[in-house]
Amino acid sequence: MRERPGGPLRAAVVGTGLIGGSILVRLHEAGVDVAGWDPDEATRAEGRRRGIAFPDELVEAVRDRGLVFLCGPLPTLPDALVTVAAHTPEGCVVTDVGSTKGGLAAFAVERGLTGRFVPGHPMAGTERFGLTAAVPALFEGAAWVLCPAPEGIDAFRLLAGLVVDVFAARVVPMSPSVHDAVVALSSHVPHLLAGSLAGAVARSDVRDAVLGLAAGSFRDGTRIAGTPAKRTADMLFHNREQVVRQLDRVRAFLDELSAALVRDDLDALVEGYRQARDLRTALLDRDLHASRREFPTSGDHADEIAYLLALGEAGGHLTGCRVGPGTVAYTGHLPEPAGPA
């Protein structure tokens, strides 16, 4: 996947914090001709020290590139998309790594960019940030959401193959709306809960004593509260409708547990935690089966898109995308059907 019909792939990464920096360094290590750009002068200097092209101007970094990753903060992505689209060839594929998809996807539709823009979200990270925290292997085995559209299916195929072959990640096809609902529960609400627990302790009159006794449960439960505050706030704000909706689900379950305590209902408390434990066990012990599907590279792509979106919504992923003469072949993995209770 380092070749395109016009020759070797030339890529650029705009915004080189932890995620963008990790993408940049991995592409560089894989032998891809890649340039980086960051608004921070010291970051650009660090990139050059690593032997990577880092022009001072964004336009110079993306000019004549066939693939551009937009990795800046969420509020900067619409302007970055417009700028990159205006200064790259028509066939240049653009994707992003933002943690919400609906807003930017709709923006791309308004600007007529869905033929070349594929919304994306690699589900990986650490509490560290900046290019100096870049981890080339960060995405190995991680889920990487890509949002396919009929008019941008060629761009999706290019990215899917690259994500699997170069980053060793699992491609999860999803619509922007489904992505935002899913990550609200799987990522954004956990940030709220971690922040709430850490914030409650910070305001408590036993704060120091809690820190003295804090063990694995507290450390694990508050780990993501160490994420930079502005990054977390941007993420929650840009998906606020789904975050509030899914938080209501969490609040309802928490209220059930709290009510069981108030009324001395041990059985109800046990049942609630049994459900929670079953879900946690399912997360750690999922059985998936592989299958291969082929579709014609030309046509209206309706069946291909339907297959991809159904795969992601069912909790599946792709580990292969190969485009050959007249056909594209996907290797998909789906959870095994649940057995009898």
Image (cartoon, rainbow, N blue to C red):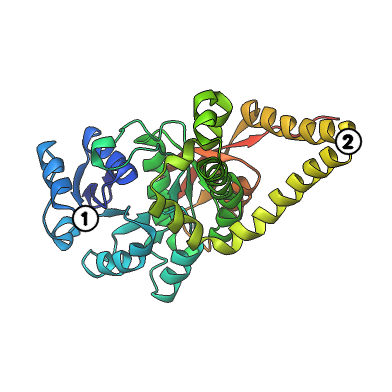
Label 1 Cα neighbours within 10 Å, binned few <14 / some 14-19 / many ≥20 = many
Q: Position of residue 169 (x, y in %)?
A: 44, 36
Q: Residue lying at the far bottom in this picture: please name it.
A: 110
Residue 152's quadrant in the figure? bottom left
Q: Where is residue 283 in the image (x, y as percent from the top left)?
A: 64, 32
Give left or right: position of 323 versus 52. right
Q: At numbered mark 2, what does the secondary structure look like: helix, strand or loop?
A: loop
Q: Nearer the viewer, residue 303 or 198?
A: 198
Above or below, comparing residue 77 to residue 260 in the picture? below
Mark 2 or 1, nearer chain start: 1
Identify the mark at residue 231; answer none if there is no mark: none
Residue 325 shows in the view: no
Please identify, in this view, whether the residue under mark 2 or under mark 1 is nearer the observer.
Answer: 2
Alpha carbon distance from label 2 to label 1 = 65 Å
Disc 1 residue type (three-letter): Arg
> Disc 2 designates what residue?
264
Give left or right: position of 304 versus 31. right
Above or below, comparing residue 240 to residue 185 in the picture? below
Q: Which of 265 and 94 is in front in this view?
A: 265
Going 37% across and 55% down the picture, which residue do you hit?
A: 95
Going 30% across and 46% down the picture, which residue do you hit?
A: 20
Looking at the rendered image, the quarter that the N terminus falls into is top left
Going 66% across and 44% down the picture, which residue do you hit?
A: 314
> Disc 1 designates what residue?
65
